Image (spheres, rainbow, N blue to C red):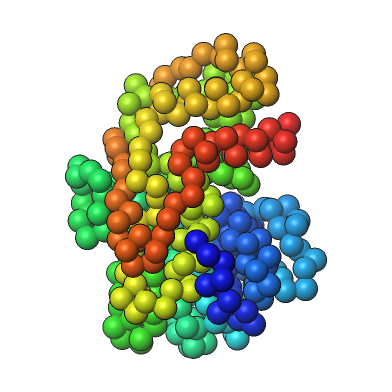
C-alpha cells in the first residue's frame, strides 16, 4: 500500500464516528498523521477519551461529544465533511442478546441517521463497519461476499440491515457507500475490560495476571483474526479508491486464514512468556459454548484484493506479537 495514493485526502475533511473506540481511534491517528482534517464523533458509551491522547491537541483534529441516535447531532457533525468512516456501533453478540432494543437503536436507527445526514451534507463517500456476523448459519468456507446465511443474533441482524440501507441510499439518493465486513479485529487500544471484552485482550489481561482464561467450548471454534493495521488499510483504500467498480459494494476485511481458540491461546502464551516466563505455566479452562456463536469463520479476501488493491500486512502471528508488546507496555 503506497501512501502516495492518499494525496487526494489532503485538504479534505473526514468524519470518524465512534472515533474514540478501538478501531475508530486507530483510524483517527492515522488520518491526523496524514494531515487530513479529522472530526471525531463519539458518545463514550464504549470508547475512551484516553484513546485520543496522542492527537487531542493536534490542530487538524476536532472532537464532538454526541450520540448518533440524535439526528441533529449527526447533521452538525457532517457539515463540511468530504468522507465518513462510520465505526460507531454497539458491538458484541452477547450484548445484543441481552438487550436487543438498544443494539437496534444504535446500530440501525443511528446508522440511518448518519446516512440521512451524509446525504443532506453532500458527503462524497460513506464507508461503514459491517460485520462477518452477517454470514450467520452459512457453513460455506471461505466466506464470499455474495453468499450469506440466516443471522444468528440481533447484532448480526442490525449489521445486515446496515448493508440493505446502504444499497437503498445509493439507488434512491446516489450516495456512494462501501461496507467493510470486519472479521475478529484485534490490536492496540482494544479494551480488555468489561463484560463484553473481545477474546484476545481479555485473555492477554488474564495471562498477565496469571489467571486461567476460559475458552467457550472445546477450543476448536476458529476465526479469521485480523490485525488492526489491515483494517486501517482497508478503510483508507475504501475512501481513496478511484475504481468506480469498487464503490457500493461490501468487502471482507480479514487476512484469509483461520486460527482456532486452542492455537490462539498457545500463541498468546508463547509471546507473553517472553516478558514473563511464569505465564507459560498458566492452565487453560473450558466453559460452555456461547449462544449465537458460529463455529468457524474464514474470509476470502479476493474481492478486496481485486477491486481495492488490498494487501494484508499482518498475519495472526505478526499481529499478535505487536499487540502483545503494546499490551505489555500499556496495561501493566
Q: Quick one: which residue is furthest to the top in this view?
A: 281
Q: How many marks?
A: 0
Q: Quadrant of the C terminus?
A: top right
Q: Position of residue 283 (x, y in %)?
A: 51, 13
Q: Quadrant of residue 20?
A: bottom right
Q: Residue at the location (30% across, 61% down)?
A: 303
Is residue 101 positioned above or below 219 on the image? below
**Residue lying at 39% horizontally and 66% vertically, measured from the top left:** 308
Residue 111 vs residue 138: left or right? right
Of residue 246 and residue 174, the one placed in the foreground of this image is 246
Q: Point out residue 248 in the picture as x, y percentages from the top left corner.
A: 33, 74
Looking at the picture, how far across and down is residue 167, in whole percent? 30, 74
Horizontal side of residue 80 vs 242, given as left or right: right
Who is closer to the viewer here, 60 or 90? 60
Position of 317 relative to 234 (above/below): above
- Residue 165 appears in view: no
The residue positioned 57% from the left and 15% from the top of the image is 280
Q: With 69 as the anchor, is 138 left or right in this view?
A: left
- List x then y, in percent, for residue 141: 23, 43
Q: Is residue 229 visible?
A: yes
Q: Residue at x 33, y 67 (%)?
A: 307
Amino acid at each position: 500500500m503506497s501512501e502516495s495514493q492518499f494525496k487526494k485526502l489532503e485538504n479534505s475533511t473526514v468524519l470518524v464516528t465512534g472515533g474514540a473506540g478501538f478501531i475508530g481511534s486507530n483510524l483517527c491517528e492515522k488520518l491526523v498523521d496524514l494531515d487530513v482534517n479529522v472530526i471525531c464523533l463519539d458518545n463514550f458509551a464504549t470508547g475512551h477519551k484516553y484513546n485520543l491522547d496522542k492527537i487531542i491537541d493536534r490542530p487538524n483534529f476536532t472532537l464532538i461529544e454526541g450520540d448518533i441516535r440524535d439526528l441533529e447531532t449527526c447533521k452538525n457533525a457532517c457539515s463540511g465533511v468530504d468522507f465518513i468512516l462510520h465505526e460507531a456501533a454497539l458491538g458484541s453478540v452477547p450484548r445484543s442478546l441481552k438487550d436487543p432494543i438498544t443494539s437496534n437503536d444504535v446500530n440501525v436507527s443511528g446508522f440511518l441517521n448518519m446516512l440521512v445526514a451524509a446525504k443532506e451534507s453532500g458527503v462524497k463517500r460513506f464507508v461503514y463497519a459491517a460485520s462477518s456476523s452477517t454470514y450467520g448459519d452459512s457453513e460455506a468456507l471461505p466466506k464470499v461476499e455474495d453468499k450469506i446465511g440466516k443471522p444468528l443474533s440481533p447484532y448480526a441482524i442490525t449489521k445486515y440491515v446496515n448493508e440493505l440501507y446502504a444499497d437503498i441510499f445509493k439507488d434512491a439518493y446516489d450516495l456512494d457507500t462501501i461496507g467493510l465486513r470486519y472479521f475478529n479485529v484485534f490490536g492496540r487500544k482494544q479494551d480488555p475490560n468489561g463484560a463484553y471484552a473481545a477474546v484476545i485482550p481479555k485473555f492477554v489481561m488474564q495471562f498477565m495476571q496469571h489467571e486461567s482464561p476460559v475458552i467457550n467450548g472445546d477450543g476448536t471454534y476458529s476465526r479469521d483474526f485480523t490485525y488492526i493495521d489491515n483494517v486501517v488499510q482497508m478503510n483508507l483504500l475504501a475512501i481513496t479508491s478511484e475504481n468506480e467498480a469498487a464503490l457500493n459494494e461490501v468487502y471482507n476485511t480479514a487476512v484469509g486464514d483461520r486460527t482456532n481458540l486452542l492455537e490462539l491461546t498457545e500463541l498468546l502464551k508463547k509471546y507473553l512468556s517472553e516478558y514473563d516466563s511464569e505465564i507459560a505455566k498458566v492452565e487453560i479452562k473450558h466453559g460452555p459454548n456461547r449462544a449465537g456463536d458460529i463455529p468457524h469463520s474464514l474470509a476470502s479476501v479476493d474481492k478486496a484484493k481485486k477491486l481495492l488493491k488490498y494487501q494484508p500486512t499482518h498475519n495472526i502471528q505478526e499481529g499478535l506479537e505487536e499487540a502483545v508488546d503494546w499490551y505489555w507496555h500499556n496495561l501493566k
